[in-house]
Amino acid sequence: MKKVFAGAAFGENILSLFRLTNQTILVTEYHIEATDTLHGKLLAQVVYGYEVVPIAYPSHADAHLKLMPSDDIRLQVGDRLIVLATIQSLQKIEWGIPTPPRRWQLQALKPLNTGATYDAGNTLESISGCELSEARAFMNRLPENSDAPGLMDSPSMITRRLICSANSANYYLFS
């Protein structure tokens, strides 16, 4: 019960809690506000930075509830997010101190279709949290080994998404 009070002290709505492998897991609802540490972040940044598991995302833009939402959703004012979290995760969110992201090096071959490079740049921006200009510059420098722009906590997910966006048998990305 102390954990619920501790979670509620952070100003979040604790919906439920349970014990799993000697840890208390809190089912917590966030209402995203303009001054919130989660405002403007991709769910990937929330997942890997604050070590939480989003289980539901009812967007303010539509009434549709997304269960196990995609990690390329950017949180906006008015959105709600329901996560599984520990007290330590809630503290990180409250204080705005995420776990530092790991940096990955990507190796890619330049696609034969220049349109694929353009589309892959858009995809890289949407899933990495980097600026569009940085993503496009990365794609235009191919082929090379380079530090990946933005947040790259899940290289396998990024690899799958970029390969799908390029839609070309001549495009490969390795992590």
Image (tube, grey):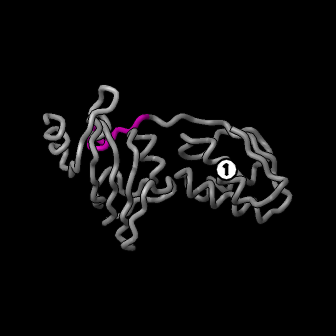
Mark 1 residue crowding within 10 angstroms, few (<14) / some (14–19) / many (20+) = few
Number of numbered markers: 1
- Image quarter hosting the C terminus: top right
Please, what secondary structure does the residue beneath circle 1 have? helix
Q: Please state which of residues 122 and 165 is positioned toward the viewer in this rendering.
A: 165
Instruction: Verify whether residue 12 appears in magenta.
Output: no
- Residue type marked 1: Arg
Q: Which residues are magenta?
A: 91-99
Residue visible at 69% across and 60% down in the picture: 165
State left or right for residue 91 relative to residue 51.
left
Q: Please state which of residues 37 and 81 is positioned toward the viewer in this rendering.
A: 81
Question: Vertical placement of 93 versus 38: above or below?
Answer: above
Q: Please state which of residues 64 and 139 is positioned toward the viewer in this rendering.
A: 64
Q: Position of residue 90 (x, y in %)?
A: 28, 41
Q: Position of residue 54 (x, y in %)?
A: 40, 50
Residue visible at 46% across and 54% down in the picture: 42
Q: Quadrant of residue 93?
A: top left
Q: Quadrant of residue 152?
A: top right
State left or right for residue 26 relative to residue 153.
left
Question: Vertical placement of 117 versus 173: above or below?
Answer: below
Q: Return the residue at label 1.
A: 160
Q: Position of residue 41 (x, y in %)?
A: 42, 53
